[in-house]
Amino acid sequence: MKITDAKVIVCSPGRNFVTLKVTTEDGLYGLGDATLNGRELAVASYLADHVIPLLIGRDARRVEDTWQYLYKGAYWRRGPVTMTAISAVDTALWDIKGKSLNVPVYQLLGGASRDAVMVYGHASGADIESTLHAVAEYLRLGYKAVRVQSGVPGMATVYGVGRGDFYYEPAEPGRPPECLWSSEAYLNFVPHLFERLRKEFGSAVHLLHDVHHRLTPIEAARLGKSLEPYHLFWLEDPVPAELQESFRLIRQHTTTPLAVGEVFNSVYDCQQLIQEQLIDYIRTTVVHAGGISHLRKIASLAELYHVRTGCHGATDMSPVCIAAALHFDLSVHNFGIQEYMRHSAETERVFSHAYTFSDGMMHPGDAPGLGVDIDEGLAAQYPYRRAYLPVNRRLDGTIHSW
Ligand SMILES: [Mg+2]
């Protein structure tokens, strides 16, 4: 089954997406998400200028061989641009394989390990009262798990606080927005937020919180310890994770479960974190960590060490990525939870999908392949708009992690 054509579709229905479409000699095609938020055109060029010429004429059925060919064949290994491009090819080939065998992709991955996939939504508000209101709305929709972020008194902008209750998009056209940050104000505030949440909503709902890489290990240890009475499902990205051993210090001080990995590209970014049992959830995604093929290897390593998966699922993961993630989530034994941020109405019109949400759970559907498609004509009506994620400064002007 030779690949006869492949192309990159760049569009911006509400936000930017890069999609790879691979077509075979018998007319089947597969889709892969290749969106790297804020650096989209680098991946588009990597695919169009360097990868697509290598795909033409290859056998679309050889998913693993193609992965290794692109990874080892590039000589320059890993990195977000390379791995996002490889992810897109891998995802598209799994889509084609499912379509060619007339089965949903999860059946090719060992079949369903569960009936449906628990997802968490994002509730936020400018202050505690509006945040409580947002959480109540998510619970009304049936969510069993909610990530909660709130404005902090004395800080003008805070990560994760959206403009509306159900849609949060941090990337903005133009130059990167600049935010100000105080770890001190944040650390003093967050325990009060979760104390109120548990008082208001009881102990049954799963509560999550994202630090977004902003603390030092000892600060994160303090936060984890202070949140223990409110038993979080997880504390996410407490510190930047380039230094994997930094999690050891956090671990020594708190039983609050830890999650990390949305910016990781490969198993080598989390090998130590997993093997030393320094985390509880690994958040690598299909689109940025080598596609379904490589994510399965990360999950297999994690399974040995009681680490569960919790794939990143922000709005910059296109519906193609979300579909692929749901097939992976449904099949992998050590699944934990899936992040699910609702896409804009424009995005939903451009990408049709078989996956569904009901009562806090999602299912990829039983359409052959990934069960997702792109309306190329409609996509063309939404041209690319350069956009950047914000940058962050401490109160004295020093650049800090956003
Ligand atoms: Mg996050």
Image (cartoon, grey):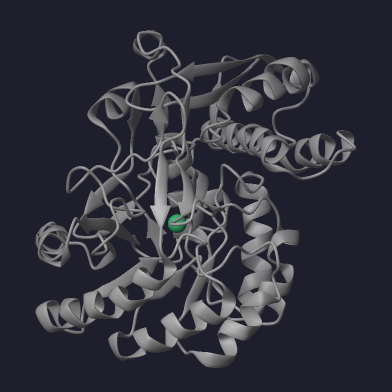
* Observer-nearest of 253 and 111: 253
Residue 194, image quadrant: bottom left
Q: Residue 186, can we see it?
A: yes
Q: Residue 21 placed where, x, y %?
A: 56, 21
Residue positioned most to the front: 396
* Observer-nearest of 30 and 181: 181
Quadrant of the snapshot with the N terminus: top right
Q: Residue 277, can we see it?
A: no
Q: Residue 361 placed where, x, y %?
A: 28, 59
Residue at 56 percent of width and 35 percent of height: 36
**Residue 86, above or below 159:** above
Ligand 1 falls in quadrant: bottom left
* Observer-nearest of 119 and 112: 119
Residue at 86 percent of width and 38 percent of height: 76
**Residue 301, above or below 251:** above
Residue 288, image quadrant: top right
In the shown orientation, is residue 111 left or right of residue 269?
left
In the shown orientation, is residue 240 left or right of residue 106?
right
Q: Residue 148 placed where, x, y %?
A: 27, 64
Q: Residue 110 placed where, x, y %?
A: 56, 58
**Residue 263, above or below 127:** above
Number of marks drawn: 0
**Residue 94, above or below 21:** below
